[in-house]
Image (cartoon, rainbow, N blue to C red):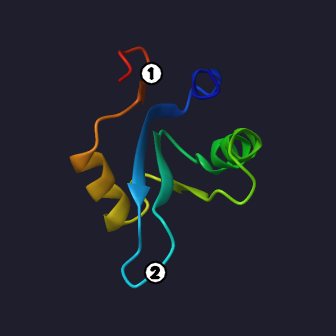
Amino acid sequence: TLFAKHSGVQAAFVAQIRLPGEQELPHLLVGLLGDGDVRPVIAEASLVAKSLLKPGEPIDFLDVGADEASLRLVEKTPPFYVRNGKTH
């Protein structure tokens, strides 16, 4: 619902990530693919997500296309939100 309110968001992806060498459990990673600057949407989505997660449960957001790692997320993960399309 949140992403549909922001016309610049074209797709959203979710995955679990665990950085090599870290002892912590994997945490959620949400990537937003958009037209233009998606940072304001990421800030809003972060607030919503943190209100829904357990205290201290980590979640990260990223701008898909901002770096090579974010592009790998898109290649290997189907989107859970697509503007004007089906969701998974």
Q: SS class of the residue under badge 1? A: loop
For the N terminus, the image quarter is top right
Relative vertical location of residue 5 with respect to residue 30 in this rendering, above or below: above
Q: Residue at x 73, y 42 (%)?
A: 44
Query: In the rendered view, does 27 fall on the left or right side of 3?
Result: left
Where, by quadrant of the figure, is residue 7 drawn?
top right
How packed is label 1: few (under 14 Cα within 10 Å), some, or many (20 or more)? some
Q: Residue at x 22, y 48 (%)?
A: 75
| Amino acid type, mark 2 | Glu
How packed is label 2: few (under 14 Cα within 10 Å), some, or many (20 or more)? few
Residue at which label 1 appears:
83
For the C terminus, the image quarter is top left
Frontmost residue, 87 versus 23: 23
Q: Can you give x and y, in whole percent of width and height, for residue 80 in the image?
A: 40, 30
Q: Can you give x and y, in whole percent of width and height, for residue 61 in the image?
A: 55, 54
Query: In the rendered view, does 77 fall on the left or right side of 37?
Result: left
| Amino acid type, mark 1 | Arg
Frontmost residue, 40 versus 19: 19
Q: Residue at x 65, y 56 (%)?
A: 57
Relative vertical location of residue 48 with respect to residue 55 in this rendering, above or below: above
Query: In the rendered view, does 71 fall on the left or right side of 62?
Result: left
Q: SS class of the residue under badge 2? A: loop
Q: What is the number of the mark on residue 22?
A: 2
